[in-house]
Amino acid sequence: MTRLPASPVVDVPDAGMARVVEAAAAACTAGQPVTLAVVLETEGSTYARAGTLVLFGEHTHVGWLSGGCLEPEIERMARECATSGRIGWMEIDTRDDSALFSGNAVGCRGCQRLLLLPLSALPGVAAVLQGWLRGEGPMRLDVDAGGGARIGCAEVAVDQRLPADRCGFDAPQGLWSLRWMPPPRALLLGAGPEVAALWPTLRGLGWQVRVADPRATWRARSPVEVEPLAASTALANAPAVPDVVLVMHHNFELDLQALEALAPCPVPFIGLLGPTRRRDDLFSLLPDAARHALQPRLHAPVGLDLGGRGPDAIALSIAAQLQSWRHGVVAPT
């Protein structure tokens, strides 16, 4: 694409877009014509923010730009772009009083400006998306109103000029630039009963989740895929240092081994399942150096006190704490 003057880059620190990107990568690999809708910028009150992604295809709809009221028209235009290979643009403005009672009746006073990017017209884009999912680095998109588009992650990039519909709104200095940070990673050590609810919740919030347990009987009972690995091996085999590790074996010896393995690892958030007395008993058996290394990062018992008992309530409390920590929101513990 033609190089234009530098434009401010909109950083998307964490928009929970992993599921959308996964679906996009799979569709591109399978040769399915799909369009990625990208929120370029917003004004006022809107359901989605800049950097939000939604995937549309003939039998595909992953993600949301509204509560459902705007999607039919966006999907119609996105399918046209997927078929034609042209870049499309949309401006959805609901700031006027009349928009409160229009057919779509969003009820939000805001404006969203969208890019409709036909991914099938970008050969090699699946490798970019897959690299981002593997945590190889941020993913950046640069696009101009004339149809120039460049999307890249780490050393892999696709640079193409596509036919484009006329854009009815202006880009800052002629170019939009957005950058998505890699999805956060969680490693769950132990395939206990909480995993059945915790795994899909974290996945829905945009996390990349691995589960490891060396016990065959526990793996067999789990409804999700579990790697047959002890804690030390699971950490050593991680493609990147996890953002979060949850120690939840429901087994004192295995939890002790996990804490020993985690002590030298630079994992920023370590959660330990179980009451404070159990935590203290585990800590009493660790060397001083391991205790000092773990203490600033250890959340034990892990989870917010939301009330309730049982695996589902525990999973919810853990997911709530991780959501709070991930977004820098101080929540009561």
Image: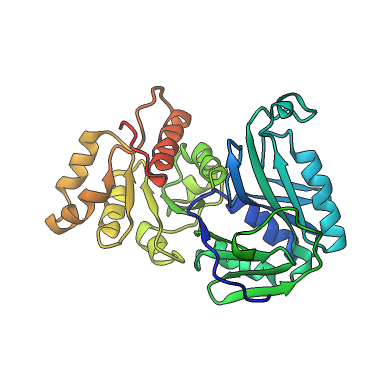
Quarter of the rendering occupied by the N terminus: bottom right
Judged left or right of residue 64, residue 31 is right
Q: How is the image coloured?
A: rainbow
Name the quadrant containing residue 35: bottom right
Residue 111, x across and y down, in percent: 65, 41
Residue 230, x across and y down, in percent: 39, 58
Judged left or right of residue 10, residue 288 is left
- Who's the residue at 68% across and 67% down the image? 126
Residue 258, x across and y down, in percent: 31, 54
- Who's the residue at 36% across and 40% down the image? 250
- In the displayed structure, 213 sits above or below 279; it is below
- Residue furthest left as drawn: 288
Question: Which residue is nearer to you in this view: 317 or 178?
Answer: 178
- In the displayed structure, 287 sits above or below 143; it is above
Residue 30, x across and y down, in percent: 77, 63
- Who's the residue at 75% across and 53% down the image? 168
| Residue 30 at least partly seen | no
| Residue 173 at least partly seen | yes
Quarter of the rendering occupied by the C terminus: top left
Q: Report the label total.
A: 0
Question: Which residue is nearer to you in this view: 81 or 307?
Answer: 81
Question: Which residue is nearer to you in this view: 328 or 26?
Answer: 328
Name the quadrant containing residue 63: top right
Judged left or right of residue 85, residue 222 is left
